[in-house]
């Protein structure tokens, strides 16, 4: 990933440089050529002005003056100079070789055009010099009369060399840009991959069973820090789930051992008494059935608790008032058989948030426990109270209540209070798990007038 990211960044930088520098190179080529031609035109007009009197007088002394002027110009790094008279015969050249003086240049198109009074600029191949030339030719005026022409020529290679020097600097900057992009990409990708490598190592440690390892949430890009936080949340959740499973397995094995042992002893006892004491054997079998029923209840509670813990259903709005009324109507016949009055007091109209069926199971469990401890003639009230932000359902009974230390432990798995002789210690644990999944809280408190207040507080749906 590191080298791939660096390569991609360099390619992008290269494409940007090419898109920018190729048109710029062409523009520089045109601009450099125009600059040289403009410079040659300026110099040609200067030489033409200085040559006017010499050409008009047409004396050898005057020719020597402009010859020195042409050679000085050439020596200063200027172009090759040829000055012709009105007939196109070379009077002055900047070359040390004087053989060209006296030769006719009228066949040169630029000279011929200048002798007609026009400025000639362009590029052509010189058969004499065997190279491509860039030329400027201007007429020498004396009033309205043309006395001759001045031609300045540069080898075209000079323009190419000048342009290449400029382009070398341009492409050197472009190359530096691409290399800097690669360095930046390498540094950035190294930083990113270093964080990813540490996260990978942490993941491998977690896969090996080291559940205490956590990713570093303080370094790296915001996205990587967010990924590290998500990983740590997952690791903590996984650690908690595995701890729950270990605790669940330990508690389950402990709780199942007793009824299984009792069941086996009763069956063995019944087998030894079946011939000598049939009635005793029947009593043992009846006790074995009781233990089997108890074992079935424990197993059913364990399965329900396991499903509750593994559930990840989202919370949804539910009408707690309607649920309370429905559950009271469901339990009322059983309450009447037990001689207990079951009433509902629910006037809240605000929906609460809970996982599906959680509110029903919590209320059912509270009512079931209340009926277990209620005496004939007693009453149970299911009350729903709304305080704008939260709604609480209370199940109020008139039973014996619980010691304060037992109300704190009542929601632990397999814990049974002093008054709970028939339970399995799983009902309130299931209630606590359902409440936690719904974002609710549950508690047991003793009522001042006697009895127990079992309550569950849900968040309102805003």
Image (spheres, grey):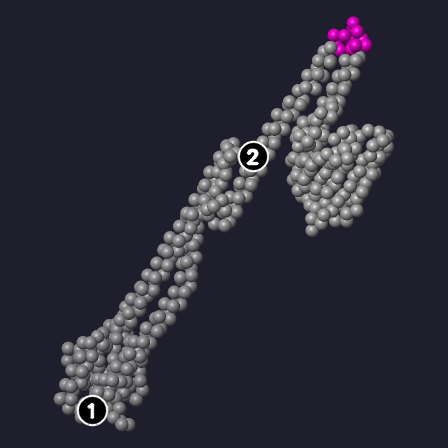
- Give the residue at x 54% y 43%: 230
**Image height check: is 63 above or below 267?**
below
Mark on residue 118?
A: none
Q: Which of 322/443 is in front?
A: 443
- Give the residue at x 75% y 17%: 288
Q: Which residues are magenta?
A: 270-281
Q: Residue beneath label 1, please? A: 53
Q: Is residue 340 left or right of residue 123?
A: right
Instruction: Decide if residue 457 is in sight here.
Output: yes
Q: Name the outermost residue toward the front.
A: 448
Q: Please report whichever mark, 2 or 1, sits nearer to the chain's N-terminal start.
A: 1
Q: Which of 155/191 is in front?
A: 191
Dots 2, 1 in contact, CB < 8 A? no
> In the image, is residue 272 part of the stretch drawn in magenta?
yes
Q: Which of 210/56 is in front?
A: 210
> In the image, is residue 244 part of the stretch drawn in magenta?
no
Q: Residue beneath label 2, please? A: 239
Q: Name the outermost residue toward the top.
A: 276
Q: Position of residue 268 (x, y in %)?
A: 72, 11
Q: Residues within 10 Å of mark 2 (few under 14, many from 20)?
A: some
Closer to us: mark 2 or mark 1? 2
């Amino acid at each position: 990933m590191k080298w791939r990211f660096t390569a991609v960044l360099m390619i992008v930088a290269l494409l940007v440089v090419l898109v920018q520098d190729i048109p710029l190179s062409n523009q520089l080529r045109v601009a450099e050529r125009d600059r040289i031609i403009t410079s040659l035109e300026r110099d040609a007009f200067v030489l033409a002005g200085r040559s006017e009197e010499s050409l008009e007088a047409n004396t050898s002394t005057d020719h020597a003056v402009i010859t020195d002027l042409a050679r000085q110009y050439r020596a200063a790094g200027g172009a090759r100079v040829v000055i012709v008279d009105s007939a196109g015969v070379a009077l002055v050249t900047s070359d040390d070789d004087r053989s060209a003086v006296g030769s006719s240049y009228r066949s040169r198109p630029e000279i011929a055009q200048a002798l007609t009074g026009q400025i000639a600029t362009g590029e052509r191949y010189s058969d004499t010099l065997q190279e491509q030339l860039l030329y400027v030719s201007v007429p020498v005026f004396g009033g309205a009369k043309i006395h001759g022409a001045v031609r300045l020529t540069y080898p075209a290679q000079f323009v190419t060399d000048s342009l290449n020097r400029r382009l070398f600097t341009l492409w050197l900057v472009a190359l530096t840009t691409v290399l800097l992009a690669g360095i930046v990409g390498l540094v950035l990708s190294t930083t990113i991959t270093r964080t990813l490598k540490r996260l990978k190592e942490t993941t491998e440690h977690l896969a090996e069973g080291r559940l205490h390892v956590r990713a570093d949430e303080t370094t790296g890009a915001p996205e990587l820090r967010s990924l590290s936080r998500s990983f740590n949340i997952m690791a903590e959740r996984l650690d908690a789930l595995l701890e729950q499973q270990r605790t669940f397995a330990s508690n389950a094995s402990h709780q199942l051992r007793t009824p299984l042992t009792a069941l086996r002893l009763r069956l063995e006892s019944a087998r030894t008494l079946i011939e000598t004491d049939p009635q005793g054997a029947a009593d043992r079998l009846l006790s074995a059935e009781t233990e089997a029923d108890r074992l079935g209840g424990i197993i059913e509670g364990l399965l329900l608790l396991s499903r509750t813990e593994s559930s990840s259903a989202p919370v949804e709005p539910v009408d707690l008032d309607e649920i309370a009324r429905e559950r009271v109507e469901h339990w009322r016949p059983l309450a009447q058989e037990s001689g207990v009055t079951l009433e509902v007091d629910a006037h809240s109209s605000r929906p609460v948030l809970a996982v599906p069926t959680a509110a029903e199971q919590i209320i059912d469990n509270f009512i079931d426990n209340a009926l277990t401890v209620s005496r004939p003639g007693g009453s149970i009230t299911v009350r729903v109270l709304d305080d704008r932000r939260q709604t609480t359902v209370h199940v109020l009974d008139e039973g014996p209540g619980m010691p304060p230390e037992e109300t704190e432990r009542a929601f632990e798995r397999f814990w049974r209070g002093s008054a709970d002789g028939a339970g399995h210690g799983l009902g309130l644990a299931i209630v606590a798990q359902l409440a936690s999944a719904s974002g609710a809280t549950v508690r047991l408190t003793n009522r001042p007038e006697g009895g127990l207040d079992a309550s569950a507080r849900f968040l309102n749906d805003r």
